[in-house]
Amino acid sequence: MSQQQADIKKEIKQDWQSDLARYPSRPWLKEVSIIAIAWYRHGLHVDNMSEGIWKKISLKIYWFIFHIIEILTGISLPKTVKVGGGLRIHHFGNIFIHKNAVIGKNCTLRQGVTLGNRYNDEVAPVLCDNVELGAYAQVLGEVTLGDSCKIGAMSVVLMDVPDKKTACGNPARILK
């Protein structure tokens, strides 16, 4: 294992510990969303493996189980998303995250959240650190949500939201 692979493995482990810290004790018995996050972190380990037959087999197993978890939990969190440590998903179900989305540290998602694109392209939202999304919030397109901002339930965000601001509505407007 190269030094770079060892560093990535250490970072993945630290992020996983940050995820667990935001959940109640024994989350495996109480919070189904932890399964999707754990499998996401496992996918990062698979990507970090040395090239070869084991990586190819592991990738096939990853995608197979990913789709099962997606069906059972209603959470689509592919390993291509960049997620900082401390991700918390409350009230799992109907959560879709675009493969190119970026989620910062200590972000909170609730049921029905979509981080996606507006058109048939590859641009996706960027959430900075400590962002909180209410139930069924939709963040679409090349949008950046600043540090510590909050998005109200059922809001449709189509524009950037500055740090420490709250946005609500359809389309979302920044509250004063």
Image (cartoon, rainbow, N blue to C red):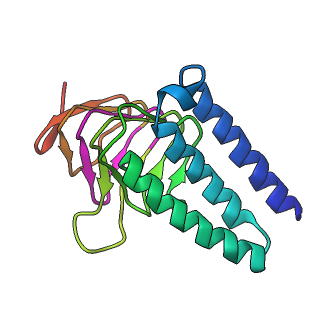
- Judge left or right: residue 40 versus residue 57: left
Above or below residue 1? Residue 113 is: above
Above or below residue 137? Residue 159 is: below
User: Can residue 54 be seen by looking at this rendering?
Assistant: yes
Front-most of 126 and 133?
133
- Quarter of the image holding residue 127? top left
Residue 25 x/y as whole percent: 59, 20
Residue 97 x/y as whole percent: 38, 54
Residue 22 x/y as whole percent: 55, 26
Residue 60 x/y as whole percent: 60, 72
Above or below residue 92? Residue 160 is: below
Q: Is residue 137 magenta?
A: yes
The C terminus - image quarter: top left
- Quarter of the image holding residue 134? top left
How many numbered marks have been drawn onto this rendered protein structure?
A: 0
Q: Is residue 78 magenta?
A: no
- Judge left or right: residue 148 versus residue 54: left
Outermost residue on the left side: it is 170
- Quarter of the image holding residue 85? top right
Q: Residue at x 72, y 72 (%)?
A: 55
Q: Residue at x 54, y 20 (%)?
A: 24
The N terminus - image quarter: bottom right
Q: Residue at x 54, y 38 (%)?
A: 105
Q: Residue at x 46, y 39 (%)?
A: 33
Q: Main secondary structure of the magenta part?
A: loop
* Numbered range of the magenta stretch: 128-146
User: Can residue 78 be seen by looking at this rendering?
Assistant: no
